[in-house]
Structures are given as C-alpha cells and as structure tokens.
Amino acid sequence: MLKRFFLNTLSSFVGTWVAIMLFGVVALLVGIGLVARFGASGNSTGISRHSILVLDLNGMIEERESSVVPDYTMLLNGGIERPQTLDVITRALRNASANKNIDALYIKCGAVAAAPATLDAIRDEVVKFKKSGKKVYAYGDNLHSGAYYVASAADSVFINPYGSISMQGLSSTSLYMKGLFDKIGISWQVVKVGTFKSAVEPYIMDKMSEPAKAQLDTLFGNMWGYMKKQICADRKKLTPARIDSLIDVVNISWAPVEEVVKSGMVDKAVYERTMDDRFAALVGKKKKDDLKFVSPRDLLADDAFSQIGGKNRIAVLYACGEIVDGAPTGINFERLVPVITNLAEDDDVKGLVLRVNSPGGSAFGSDQIGEALDYFKSKGKKLAVSMGDYAASGGYWISCGANRIFADPLTITGSIGIFGLIPNGEVLLEKIGVNPQFAGTNPQADFPTLYRPMTDEQLAVVQKNVEDGYNRFINRVAKGRGMSVDKVRAIAEGRVWDAIKAKQIGLVDELGGLEKAIEWTAKETGISDKYSLSVYPEIKPSFWDMVVDGTSFEKAAAELMNPGLSEFTIAYLRRYLTMQRVQARMPDFKVGF
C-alpha cells in the first residue's frame, strides 16, 4: 500500500512537472514570436535605397494569405511556417517595378511547389518588371522545371557549376486502386454523366480509360506548347523543337553543366557566393556587405490592398480549394453565401471579382454559391471571374454565370459533369467478422448505406438524381455563356480544357490574371479612376500568426517531437468515405514538370 502511494505521488509529480515544462516551452516560443513579430514590424516600413527584391522560388506557393490555424499533425511535422502566396508575390513585383528604392530582382530557384498557372502568373509579372529597365538575375544550384520556367524570363540565368537542370515536359500520375480495394473488401458503386468524367476511374478500374488518356494528352500538349513558346521568347537560342530535342535526345536533365550552358538554357555556371558581387556591381555598392535584400512580404508591409471600407468599392472574393459542405477548410457555401449576399446588398460595393481556384466538389454547395452570385448580379452589379490554377467542374459551375471570365493561359477548366461514388463495405465487414443487422420503419430507411450494395432500383434512383444535376449544370452554363444547350453538351461530357482552348470554344472570355479582371470590372462599373478594393473573406489573424511570423524556432522544436508517423492513407480513405454522395469534381491529378 505504501509502495503504491509513493508511486502514485511520484507519477503525479512527474505529470505536473512535464505540464509545467511544456507550458514553459510554449510560452518561450510565443514570447520569441511576439518579440520577433513586433521587432520586425519596425524595420519593414522603410525600404532602403538601392535595395534588391528577392523572389525565393522554394516550397509551396498558395493563392492568398490566410490565418494560421495549426492542428496536431502540423505541430508534429513542424509545418506551421507561413507559405508564400501568389497574391503577395505578384503585388510585390508590381510594386517593385515602380518603387524607386528597388534597383533589381533576384530570383533564387529551388524546389517550388506550384501549379503551372500560378508560375505563369508570376512569370508574367517578371516580364512586366523587366520593362521598367531594372535588371533581373536568376540563380539555382539545381534548376527545377517550375522554377526555371519563371527564371527563363530573367536577363541572365546562372547555375551552379556542379548543378543540374530538370526539364522533362509535363506529366501526371494517377493511382488506380481497384486492386487495393478488392483486397480490403471495398467496392464502389458509380453513377455518372460524361464520357470524360474520369474522377471515378481510380476506384473502379485497374488502368486509365482511352477517353481519360486522350483528354490529358491534349491538355498537356496544349499547355506545354504554350510554355515552350514563352521560354523561347526570352531565351533566344532556343526554339520549341530544340527544347523537345534537349529533353528527348540529349536528356538534358542528366547532362553536365557545360552542356546546359552550351544549349542556351542558362547563361553561365557560377557559385552562389559570386551572385552578391554581381548585384553589388549592378547597384553601385563597393562591397557586397552593403547590399540590402528585401522579401515580397517586407516590401508590402504598408500595402493597403486588403483594406475593407470606403465608397465605390470593387470587392475581390476568393473561392479556393474543394467545394465542401460544412467543413472548416475549402469552399464552404455556408460561409461564402452570406458574404456574397452582404456584398450584393452593400451600396458601396459596385462590382465583384470572384477569384476561383478550385477543382470542384459538392454539387449542392456549387449550386448554392451559384444562386448567391445570381442574386448579386440581380442588383445590377457587374460580376467578373478570375480563374487560377483550376476552375473545373464545380469550380466552373460557380464561374459560368459571370459577366466576363478571365483565365491564365495555363488554367485548367471545364470538366462539366457530375458523378456519384458510393462505397460498399459488405465484403470488408465479412472479412473482419462484423454482421450488420437492419431494423427500420421503411426498406429505404438507411439508404444509401456502407453495409450492403444498392439494389437495381436504388441505383436507378441515384443515376436519375445525377442526370438531373447534370442537366441543371448544362442549362446553367448555357444561360451564363449565352450558348445553346446542344453546344454546351458537345463540349461538356466531363472533359477538362486548357484555358486557351476554353476561350476558343466559349467557356472563357479573355486570357489574363486577377489584375486584368479588376480593371475590367472597374471600367464596366464606371469608376476606373476612383475606386478602392476590398478583399473577402476577411482574414482574422489568429494567435499563431504572431508566433509564425516572428520565428521558426517552434518548427525546430516540433521536429524534435516528430515520431515519424503518417496518417496519409487513413486520411485519403476517410475523405472518400465521408464526402457528399453527388460530386461535381475534376479528376484527381496534379501536373508535374
């Protein structure tokens, strides 16, 4: 008894001690963050003369700024540093081109994670920056394809003498998992409309269908053709045919640096330390220690782009991520619809630009958002859509009613189609010894259910529901785009399109970015010279924002506690077992290059 008492007492003491230590660590991290946060703010308001803007193409680039809300997996993986955003980068480049204190741009190339449309938008701003007469230098130890695409617009591109360049074209890999689901005892009951609506294929097939492959071959071929043309416009020694030859014949990704320089893809092989000397000479500094480098976020410390309020406003509303019902992340109609309604009823808001970056999702949520946008237009206000990386399926559903649609040339859009994907775990339950017993007032009381397959009658009911949704989608596109229903059906069928082709077939009005959409909206509203911008949804900084912006020490601490566990597989299955039963979603593929 006495021994147990001492053990209990000791365990309580240890538990209390650990709690105190953890609290102390958190307090220390927060303290460091706050000091760094407020200390940094005092230095960000003034940019020294002859400064150099640094564009660090490394890591993930997201659409826009958002508040930091870490979960336990983020903490364990040390991933609570704030990522770069397209919004900040493009505005900083625009600011820097006119800023008298910025003399040059330094593009540092790393392993950037961004879709082609995002990188194309950044590259376009680099090209515009060069028109100011200011120099642009790019450097990379290893030039990855995405970063090189942006860097190819620079006046000079440098590479490490022992580095390499990754240039392999465009591709994607989709994991077809029928064999896996057969082994674990899950089958998928599919209802869909559209020959090219291939989002369901990985769950019911062992390999890609011919229509799915054909649409991707066309999509990637068109996108790659555009990208080669852009690279060759600035790299005068290259031609589109020469780029393909370097990839297919020379295998430039494995060639020595001397061959890369000779090819004309880069200008010179140098070590990174020499770049400071080049910039010092460029901006008239006697020694490299006097150089002043600034980041995009530093440059925009006093930028008022996101201010809310004022008369004659153009609202910019971001709709980014999957369209989901009731989820805290993605595009949730329950949160977005009230914002649209308030903007419609705000007399100071004269027009709206909807920035869409979405592969689609819930058909129900898409319809709710679309109806709210119709309500906005019913107030006599102009609505423009600016498409980002993707505006497909449900993403196109919410876009097609706009007065004018803008898209980056590398935007992926279309995918007009609907499907239902309903799991059946009957075999899995048998394997693990679970025998569900049903009792209810009606035969359909638990329909649809995970525990047994649908009957033919039930399957017909779901198919009819999906077909009705598809017809609703088709009619909405026809009305929004001023096209006949038959014409929409001919280009629908779930097929994805690159924006250049989408413009040719009437799904997009104009090629251009967010800035172009804003300018059009202001002009159409008659307030081109006297408008302000407000951005929605409003970002409400969290407690963690102050910590993350101030220090990365918490990342190092989190990495020490990382047990190396991953929930990827579980999360992947959970996503599809719990999603809405009717989806307007494009195929799950990421473009790699």
Image (cartoon, helix red, strand yellow):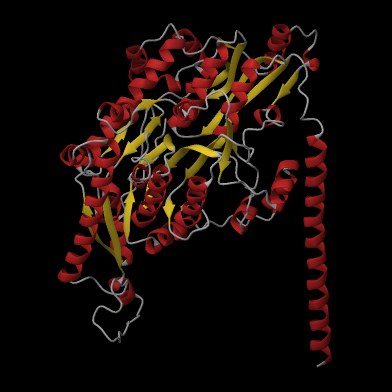
Classify 551 as above or below 72: above
Left or right of 559 in this view: 196 = left
* Res 175 seen here: yes
Left or right of 135 in this view: 515 = left
Q: Which residue appears farthest toward the bottom when viewing the image?
A: 1
Left or right of 146 in this view: 493 = left
Residue located at (21% from left, 37% from top):
491
Classify 507 as above or below 444: above
Residue located at (60% from left, 13% from top):
136
Measured as percent of width and height from the top left, residue 198 is found at 26, 47
**Quarter of the image holding residue 447?**
bottom left
Residue located at (58% from left, 22% from top):
140
**Quarter of the image holding residue 182?**
bottom left
Measured as percent of width and height from the top left, residue 213 is found at 24, 38
Q: Nearer the viewer, residue 360 or 512?
A: 512
Measured as percent of width and height from the top left, residue 188 is found at 27, 62
**Image quadrant occupied by the C terminus:** top left
Classify 560 as above or below 228: below
Q: Nearer the viewer, residue 481 or 460?
A: 481
Q: How many marks?
A: 0
Measured as percent of width and height from the top left, residue 137 is found at 60, 14
**Quarter of the image holding residue 3?**
bottom right
* Res 156 seen here: no
Classify 432 as above or below 344: below
Residue located at (71% from left, 25% from top):
294
